[in-house]
Structures are given as C-alpha cells and as structure tokens.
Image (spheres, rainbow, N blue to C red):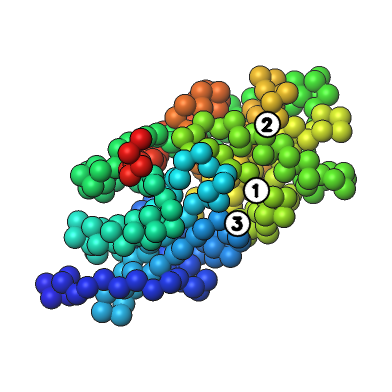
C-alpha cells in the first residue's frame, strides 16, 4: 500500500516517450492495440500553430501514466475549448490517481487560456465515465464505432462494389489510388477538398483547418501509403478520398479519413471510395476493418449499416465548462 501513497510527478514527454504512451494505451484496451511508430509520427508532426503539452506521469521514478492537453490557436475558435487527457497503466487506475492527474493537466490547460475542457472515454469504460461525471464533466456527443467482417461479408461487398463501379463509370467519375493520378497539383486539390469535407462533419468544437504544409505530413505516416489511398476525380477536380490506416506493427485496420466535396454528395461517391478500400483490404488478406463516425452523421452511418458493419464500443465526448456560459 505504501507505493500507492507516493506522490505523482510529471515530466515533459519526449518523442521517445511515445512508445510508452502507446504501450500504456494498449494495456488499457488490449482489443485496440496502439502502434508505437504511428504514435511517434503523430507526436513528431503536431501542428506548430497549436498549443500542445504532453507529460509522463511517474511514481517513485517509474512511468505509470500519460497526460496531455492541447488546443487550437484562440483566434480560430469562438470559445476557448481545450482538450485534456490523463490515464494510467491498468494496475494504477484509481480514483485518487485520476484526481491528481486531472487536477494537474486541467491546471496546465486553464493556465494556457482554456475555459471549456473536453475529454474522451470509451463508452464501455464505465468506471472512468462515472468518475468524470462526478468531477463535473457532462456527456456532449457520442461517436459510433463499427467493425466489418471481410470474410463473412466478402460476397456482399464484391456485389456492392461491382454495382458501385458501374455507377461511377456512368457518372464519369474515376476512382483510383493517389499513386496512379498524374496531376501534379493533386495534393493541393486533395487538401482543399478535405478542408471542405472536414468543415461539414458534425461537431461541437468548431473545425479548425490546417495549412497545406501541415496536411502533407499525413502522407509520411507509417500507417498510410499512396497506393492504398483512394480518390475520386471528376474532370479536373478531386471530389473525394477514403483511406484505411494499416498499423505497421500492431493494431486494427481503421478508416483514417473519408470525405467528399459538397458538389458530389448524394451521388454514391463516398460509397464507391469506401468499397474500394475494403476490396483492397480483402485482397491484402485483412480479415476485419473498423471505422468510427459522429453519432449525428446520418449518411455515413447509413452506409456503414448497408455495408454490413456491426457496432463495437465507440467514444464519448465530455465537456466541463468553466466559462460561466
């Protein structure tokens, strides 16, 4: 019992600490392993315009948890939302430890100007959800997560893909991977379209765009490759994208991003793109793929159901408002 009474200490995380953070997250949810290389890339390519602080939580000199906070530039947000997070290796997850860690990371976030804290928890992690509610956090939104069994659904997916391919041909829309597109301006067009699509995703915290330079860092992630990133082209315009992320060492295959230009919505472009990503996954021997979408994004949720995705635990977004309104 003496160990549990040792005070927690916090040291700024270095890039090398990303492996411990990924390992700790994996230990908490073994069904959702986190890839260390992907975490390292994520940390290394954080937008320099954002305020981001990460800390390793230690007890008696040993790392037992991870905490972070971040927010967009305040001139990009109508309200001062700051995201906070703190959690531990499973054997160190206690109400006492959470209280100390959240007190610390909320203090850092508030000192940087945050007036509304937001945090996330998996919807089946009832213990921390109860604790966060007791701390004053209120549920704001839910993300619905899904898994698609590519073995059981293979025939249905192949049939849907054949129908979708014919529809795209008839519509004059070309679906292909980025590596096959010869347009020298393709990345700028993908960025512009993705910014438009991202701004239309249902959200409480307003979408904050990123520069082309920052966007380009995505393509260096170890979980994505140009020959596995599918785009839709209509004439000179790139009007959609869908990407599955394949962790290089461990983890599930997830949809990294699917978005379409406003002018083609309702024409089956998102469906065509998602079907090509899963057809490719089947060809690569992948057995299951996962995706998560905001619970209010009706079109994409309907598409998931049609493709045969089944629900798995999603995420809960919670807010704690210190602004007084």
Secondary element at image label 3:
loop
Q: Which residue is mark 3?
A: 49
**Residue found farthest to the left:** 1
Q: Residue at x 57, y 46 (%)?
A: 75
Q: Which residue is mark 1?
A: 210
Q: Quadrant of the N terminus?
A: bottom left
**In front of the other: 151 or 61:** 61
Question: Marks 2 and 3: CB-CB under 8 Å?
Answer: no
Viewer can see residue 300: yes
Q: Residue at x 26, y 46 (%)?
A: 132
Viewer can see residue 219: no
Q: Which residue is mark 2?
A: 260
Q: Position of residue 189 (x, y in %)?
A: 78, 41
Above-or-below relation of 285 to 89: above
**In front of the other: 146 or 116:** 116
Label 2, residues with CA under 10 Å away: few <14, some 14-19, many ≥20:
many
Q: Earlier in the sequence, mark 2 or mark 3?
A: 3
Q: Position of residue 268 (x, y in %)?
A: 67, 23
Q: Earlier in the sequence, mark 1 or mark 2?
A: 1
**In front of the other: 115 or 177:** 115
Above-or-below relation of 203 to 36: above
Left or right position of 208 against 314: right
Secondary element at image label 2:
strand
């Amino acid at each position: 019992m003496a160990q549990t009474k040792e005070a927690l200490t916090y040291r700024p995380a270095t890039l090398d600490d990303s492996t411990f953070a990924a390992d700790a997250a994996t230990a908490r949810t073994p069904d959702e392993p986190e890839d260390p290389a992907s975490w390292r890339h994520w940390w290394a390519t954080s937008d320099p315009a954002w305020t981001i602080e990460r800390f390793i939580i230690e007890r008696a000199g040993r790392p037992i948890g991870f905490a972070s906070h971040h927010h967009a530039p305040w001139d990009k947000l109508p309200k001062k939302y700051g995201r906070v997070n703190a959690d531990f290796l499973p054997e160190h997850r206690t109400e006492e430890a959470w209280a100390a860690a959240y007190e610390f990371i909320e203090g850092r976030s508030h000192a940087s100007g945050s007036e509304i804290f937001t945090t996330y928890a998996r919807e089946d992690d009832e213990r921390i959800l109860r604790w966060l509610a007791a701390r004053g956090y209120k549920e704001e939104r839910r993300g619905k997560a899904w898994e698609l069994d590519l073995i059981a659904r293979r025939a249905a997916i192949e049939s849907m893909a054949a129908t979708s391919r014919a529809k795209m041909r008839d519509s004059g829309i070309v679906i292909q991977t980025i590596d096959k597109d010869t347009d020298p301006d393709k990345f700028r067009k993908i960025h512009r379209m993705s910014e438009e699509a991202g701004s239309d995703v249902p959200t409480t915290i307003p979408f904050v765009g990123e520069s082309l330079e920052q966007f380009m860092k995505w393509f260096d992630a170890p979980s994505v490759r140009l020959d596995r990133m599918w785009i839709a082209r209509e004439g000179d315009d790139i009007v959609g994208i869908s990407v599955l992320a394949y962790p290089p060492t461990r983890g599930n295959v997830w949809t990294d991003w699917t978005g379409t230009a406003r002018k083609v919505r309702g024409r089956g472009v998102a469906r065509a793109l998602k079907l090509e990503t899963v057809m490719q996954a089947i060809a690569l021997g992948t057995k299951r793929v996962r995706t998560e979408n905001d619970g209010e994004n009706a079109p994409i949720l309907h598409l998931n159901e049609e493709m045969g995705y089944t629900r798995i635990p999603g995420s809960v977004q919670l807010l704690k408002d210190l602004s007084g309104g």
